[in-house]
Amino acid sequence: MTHKIDPCTLVLFGASGNLSRVKLIPGLFRLDLLGRLPDTMKILSVGRQEVAPDAWHADIKSMLDAKFKNGVDAKVFERFIARNFYHANAPTDSNAFRKMKATLSDEKVFPQNLAFFLSVRPTDFAPVVDQLAAEGLTQEDKYWRRVVIEKPFGTDLPSAQELQKSISKHLKESQIYRIDHYLGKSALQNIMLQRFTNTLLEPIWNNQYIDHVQITNTEMLGVGDRTKFYDSTGAVRDMIQSHILQILALTTMELPKDLTPKGVRASKIKVLEQIRPIPVNELSKHAFRAQYASGVVNGEKVPGYLEELEDNSSVVETYAAMKLFIDNPRWQGVPFYIRTAKRLHEADTRICIRFKKAPLQVNSQDQNWLIIGIQPRECIKMEIQSKIPGLDINTRTIQLDAANRLPEDDTVDAYEALLLNLMQGDNSNYLHISEAEAQWRLVDPVVKAWAADKKPVYQYPAGSRDPEASKVIFEHEDQFWRTSIELGGDKP
Ligand SMILES: NC(=O)c1ccc[n+]([C@@H]2O[C@H](COP(=O)([O-])OP(=O)(O)OC[C@H]3O[C@@H](n4cnc5c(N)ncnc54)[C@H](OP(=O)(O)O)[C@@H]3O)[C@@H](O)[C@H]2O)c1
């Protein structure tokens, strides 16, 4: 499905920042290269410093050169540069936004449908919206006005609600585009489509057939030079509150009424609100945290988290696992084990579904798995039991393995897809406020309880598999972490 795009101007705040340099400007260039930007579309970059037009264009060139090592098409580059303008919004200038409005009001240059992308510090989201509104730039009369709020939308439920209260003074829900960049990934969009466009899967996608589900995101990398940021965030807020709960929602939602943004989001909101709150009085049975200690990754010795942080008192988790239940007829009684970790033995994001025991059990391991690989491999795998040819009756597991991405397929960065959706006015891959709230409501009690518990945190060696102690959250003795998408990854 393709949507038409109105002539528009993208106003990019924080244009010289890291996200803009690495993702947004290169993403917009790629969209131009693919012929997906309207001819008259313009980009007004906004930053605190004065930058001359030539210098800004040279800076854009350096961003593109850094991203596209094989060079950029000269003709497309010329077209792209002609779309790009810069406006200095000096922090000391109380008229800065008025001047920006005056610049934008030149209709011969700037189409008047305006999308403001706030790639700035989270503390600046609300003040920037206030100032845009004060100049009447959020008012939709003849033209649409949209505002993208980067991640994170708050740091807990009260701060998310406070931010919402502030920006909703000026913006309707339909004007607010909250980013969770995982939703721009084709592999995530595929979860819903693969489920609902195949008769094979949907009939068994419920508690009658499914024993449990594991949603996993692991990295081999540590926190690197982001120690301060990470220690104020932790694995739950960084990954579970956002990306992992969105993967869970896509895996468990009911068939949307239709494929409109409203229909898709309503279905996700419903299931997110049906997740049972984690009982804090029994937290140790439902959630487990740990920190990586020194160890060996890719043959290289690496320091532990506390050493990198140079603070032994931190109790912030680099490994978090949780058990969740969804209180609806489809999922009643099915545990969802979600986990995220830094410095584990492999980097992988996947959904693993373990089916219930078959009517005939030759080996105790005769249970089927369905695996959806999200990254690095976009694939769907099914593990089934099969007889080993020979005189005796013995079974082994075989794997049906299909790629969801073929070598010739387009590689589209998540931000390219999201930027296109923004201009199309399609917010199905952006978060509704009810999703953001449901996600914070769920994780807040865990984050709070863990922060208050100052006992030293369980340590796992960098490069290892899941900490043995994490198994405490499993409901049954025959449940265990699946450690890879490959055959054999189901061995405890
Ligand atoms: N980088 C990522 O991969 C990533 C991932 C997820 C979410 N995000 C979110 O995206 C947003 C931008 O991230 P980023 O990594 O690009 O941030 P960044 O490089 O630290 O800064 C973005 C912009 O914020 C302005 N800024 C920086 N420090 C400031 C200060 N002390 N006072 C006022 N303005 C300041 C600068 O704009 P001027 O041009 O005005 O100087 C800068 O270009 C953040 O909300 C972040 O949470 C980023």
Image (cartoon, rainbow, N blue to C red):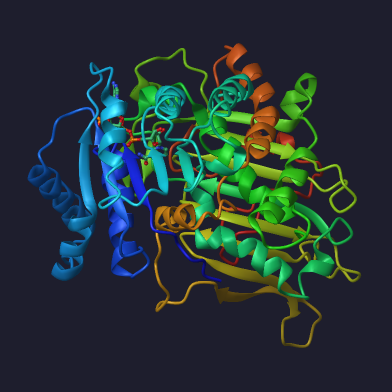
Residue at 53% in and 38% down: 239
Relative depth, front residue between 445 and 13: 13
Tell me how many marks there are: 0
Residue 479: x, y in percent?
A: 75, 49
Residue 490, compared with residue 133, is above or below; it is below
The answer to whether any part of residue 62 appears in the image is: yes
Q: Is residue 401 left or right of residue 138?
A: right
Q: Is residue 125 left or right of residue 259?
A: left
Q: Is residue 55 left or right of residue 167?
A: left
The answer to whether any part of residue 467 appears in the image is: no
Query: Taking the image as four quarters, which one is ligand 1 found in?
Result: top left
Residue 310: x, y in percent?
A: 34, 17
Residue 423: x, y in percent?
A: 45, 55
Residue 475, compared with residue 394, is above or below; it is above
Residue at 77% in and 45% down: 270
Write down the quadrant of residue 20 in the picture. Answer: top left
Residue at 75% in and 40% down: 474
Residue at 32% in and 57% down: 41
Relative depth, front residue between 439 and 108: 108
Q: Is residue 78 left or right of residue 252?
A: left
Residue 5, compared with residue 335, is above or below; it is below
Looking at the rendered image, the quarter that the N terminus falls into is bottom right
Residue 374: x, y in percent?
A: 54, 59
